[in-house]
Amino acid sequence: MKNPIILSIFMVLVLALNVQAQDKLSWKQHVKLADELYAKAEYADAGEHYRAAWKQKTKKKELAYKAGECFYTIRDYRNAADAWKNVKDDNANYPLIGLRYARCLKQNGEHEAASSELVDFLGRYSGSDKVTVSQIVQNELRGCELAAQQTIRGDDPNILLEHLSSNVNTPETEFGPIPFSDEALYFSSTMAKRAEIYRTIKTGGGDWGKASPIEHFPVIEKDHFCNGSLTPDASRFYFTICKSVEKWGGLTTHCEIYVTRLIGKSWTTPERLPDYINEQNVSTTQPNVIQDGNTEILYFASNRNGGMGGMDIWYTTREMSSTANDFTLPINAGSRINTYADEITPFYDKIEDMLYFASNGLVSVGGFDIFRSKGAKSQWQTAENVGSPLNSPADDFSFVKTTSGKGGFLVSNRNFGMEKISTTHEDIFSFQYQKPVIQWVARGEVFSKVTREMLDDVEIALYEMGDAGQRSFLTKIVSANGHYDFPVEPSRKYYLEALKDGYYPSSYEFDSYDYNNYTDFGAPLYLEPSGDTGISMKEDVKKVPVKESVDTAAGKPATKPAKEEVAKKEPVKTSPIAEKTTTKPATAKKSNVESGKTAAPVTTGTYYKIQIIALAKVDMNHSRFSKVKNLRRIDQEFFSDRKLYRVLLADYASIEDAEADLPNVRGMKDFSDAFIVEYKDGERGRTIEK
């Protein structure tokens, strides 16, 4: 195993010698060397020489730009940001440089600084494509916010991530893991200066053995061959053959998908898939094959014509009874998966009916993040970020599970302790799912009994109860948004009380003897006003109409109670030990037409939004908004008549687009009453209840 400390010292000494040698060159000599190195795709050295030239000739800012371009190409985010900070405001000469600089900060884990630079860039930007650029910037800002949230939450304790040893990972690039079993791993590597497929087997001690080229595989001269996928019956192996005039360049390398079949103990000569799959002058790569009945489904990534951005996820099928490579025409996996940017490395888990893939167009904490979406072919639920530790500020992709499902592998260029100290190359990481650790939690929210809205600035105290009913104070909080979340110990009795000026206190008792009995319960608290709180029940309900519904038993119209009646119903008090849901206050349906001027960005023409909730006070850091933020931009509108803030997902160009997201929104906690609203030239119009 390589010693990281010795390696670090060696790198420092080499760098020092390089600096001494560079000091003797003029800035023109540095530029000449840099140009020659760039032409040979030796970007790291080229970047150093451009930077050295710029330090001698600081007025020539194009040298700082070129240095950053070299470092960015090899994903050396720290050095790219260091070079581009000198030109970050010069978007006229270096288009979108401010955005690219902010992305370098983001991928270097400097999310707060990245957010500041993104806002500053957008304020300065005046290009004709500002609407599109604004959407990209907003997406990056959401990524920075997601990273901040994940930092607070910490890594998922049920996932153990490990960096594979030097028997597998080298100073070159390792990628494309293919678990053959829990004990055997095939993968791709450029350790021999071109991408080839290797194999490693676990030793008796549980470590991975020294990697070696795969045996009995067809000989492929010169070209890269990598990114494989074996059919479940082990009869066909799909992989890519790639051509490159430079070093291995990942997405910059032109690849096509081939298949080889197992006949006896030997693999046949690789066959290129048809032209309608491997289109000319595009890259088609990263196949992932599954079998469903008599149908073989091949997912892959390609920047072929008809996509939604750069690389997209596509699929094609064939009948397994056929011996020919007669696939159907490829179909795009759709807008729930693909974006304006790149989606790569599909892996379909047939047990979960879940597609795992990587994207840098969805909301990510770094560049490429790993996402998952339930569905098949081109029908998918909204993609979900898998979180940390599987994702990092750098690029993470090639998620794949082992055959047992107990763990798997992914590829990342992240820094990882002293085991990996550079982001300029990818390594393979393994992960294991640990046995979940039960965390007992008392969780809920405090509402006004009159308005059914959450109360702010509520004092909530937790006590432990003895056998004789005596209370021992444990802790208290002043909740700014009415939400409480107390960790508690198992096999105890507790008493929880909420207090607020102008309201009578409310409390309940609970115990933590049987965790399983509480997974479907929550305990909201409702405080009744003790005097004049400035809230009129009459004012709160005067605009809510009585609606008609069908009495299914009698087959005739039945009157549905208005909000005033619903508000009088008391919730059933249950224990607050809850991991899944919290009981929501009863709500009334919106009136069918409700207009008002929106304070959100105004769009001309007719468009739609999904109103997800209305609150007296909005805290966008509340956990209820964590998943919905990934769907669309979130707007807030102040409804002065009722002193409420509407929270909406925006914008949808058509009602069909809004209807596609509505079931997912309603399936989220707290948003079951979400509905669609029509807007015309910034004016709020009719509501559309589905």
Image (cartoon, rainbow, N blue to C red):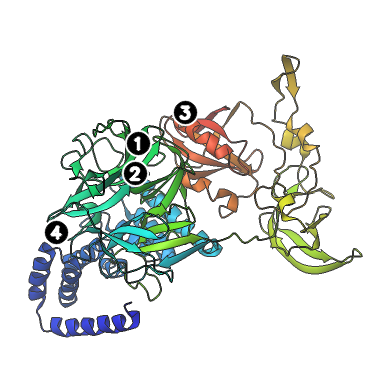
Name the foreground residue: 355 vs 30.
355
Label 2 and label 4: CA atoms lie apart by: 32 Å
Q: Is residue 472 left or right of residue 636?
A: right
- Label 3 or label 4, whichever comes before in sequence order: 4
Compared with 48, 320 (above or below) is above
Name the foreground residue: 620 vs 400.
400
Tell me the element at label 3.
helix
Residue holding disc 2: 231
CB under 8 Å between discs 2 and 1? yes
Report the mark closest to the observer, 2 or 4: 2
Label 2 and label 1: CA atoms lie apart by: 9 Å
Residue holding disc 1: 296
Label 3 and label 4: CA atoms lie apart by: 48 Å
- Label 4 or label 1, whichever comes before in sequence order: 4
- Label 2 or label 1, whichever comes before in sequence order: 2
Q: Is residue 541 left or right of residue 493?
A: left
Tell me the element at label 1.
strand
Tell me the element at label 4.
loop
Report the mark closest to the observer, 3 or 4: 4
Residue holding disc 4: 246
- Label 2 or label 3, whichever comes before in sequence order: 2
CB under 8 Å between discs 4 and 1? no
Q: Residues within 10 Å of mark 1 (few under 14, many from 20)?
A: some
Label 2 and label 3: CA atoms lie apart by: 41 Å
CB under 8 Å between discs 3 and 4? no
Report the mark closest to the observer, 2 or 3: 2
Q: How many marks?
A: 4
Task: Tell me the amino acid under the disc marked 4.
Answer: Glu
- Residue 206 visible to an observer of this rendering: yes
